[in-house]
Amino acid sequence: MSSYPAPSRVSGALIRARDWLDERGKVAWIAAMILGFVVFWPLGLALLGYMIWSKRMFSCSNRRARARYHAPTTGNSAFDAYRAETLKRLEDEHREFVDFLQKLREAKDKAEFDQFMQNRGEKPEVHTDA
């Protein structure tokens, strides 16, 4: 069990937005900052501060893809090949596990819905003592 708290909906949305902007590069960050200034100037200022603080303003774009696929080599080609193969296998297993969890949720939802539909058809008996 993880000792980290589960991210809230807001922080999850912010993380997805950050990753989405990172995938599109520096131009997307600048466009978001300008849009932030146009919509609500403190938002634009906050984005500018975040870009400077996180060094997104001065580094090359596509940070996530670069970090994932261009890891520094160790100089040992056998180990580097093993590491690349293991990372690919882990990513595949992760994707399969996420798909499994989605199917599990869908099965649970279907079972709950079927139970609801079955209970809905049943009418409680009314006892009258006359």
Image (cartoon, rainbow, N blue to C red):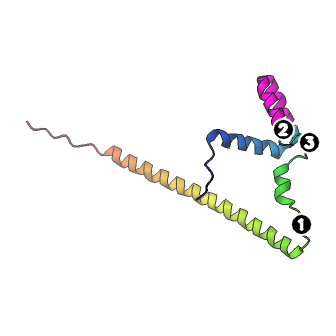
In x, y percent, where is residue 41?
A: 79, 23
The amino acid type of the residue labelled 2 equals Met
What residue sits right under mark 2 in the picture?
51
Examine the rendering and report whether any part of residue 12 can be seen. Answer: yes
- Disc 3 vs disc 2: Cβ atoms closer than 8 Å? no
What residue sits right under mark 3 in the picture?
58
Q: Is residue 113 above or below residue 47?
A: below
Left or right, 36 with reference to 14: right
Closer to the chain start, of discs 2 and 1, is 2
The amino acid type of the residue labelled 3 equals Phe
Residue at the image position 50 percent from the left and 55 percent from the top: 107
Q: Is 96 included in the stretch rendered in magenta?
A: no
The amino acid type of the residue labelled 1 equals Thr
For marks 3 and 2, give the CA distance. 9 Å
What residue sits right under mark 1 in the picture?
73
In x, y percent, where is residue 33?
A: 83, 31
Left or right, 32 with reference to 16: right
Q: Is 33 included in the stretch rendered in magenta?
A: yes
Q: Which residues fall within the magenta stretch?
A: 29-50
- Disc 2 vs disc 1: Cβ atoms closer than 8 Å? no
Residue at the image position 33 percent from the left and 45 percent from the top: 121
- Disc 3 vs disc 1: Cβ atoms closer than 8 Å? no
Closer to the chain start, of discs 3 and 2, is 2
- Looking at the rendered structure, the secondary structure element under dot 2 is helix
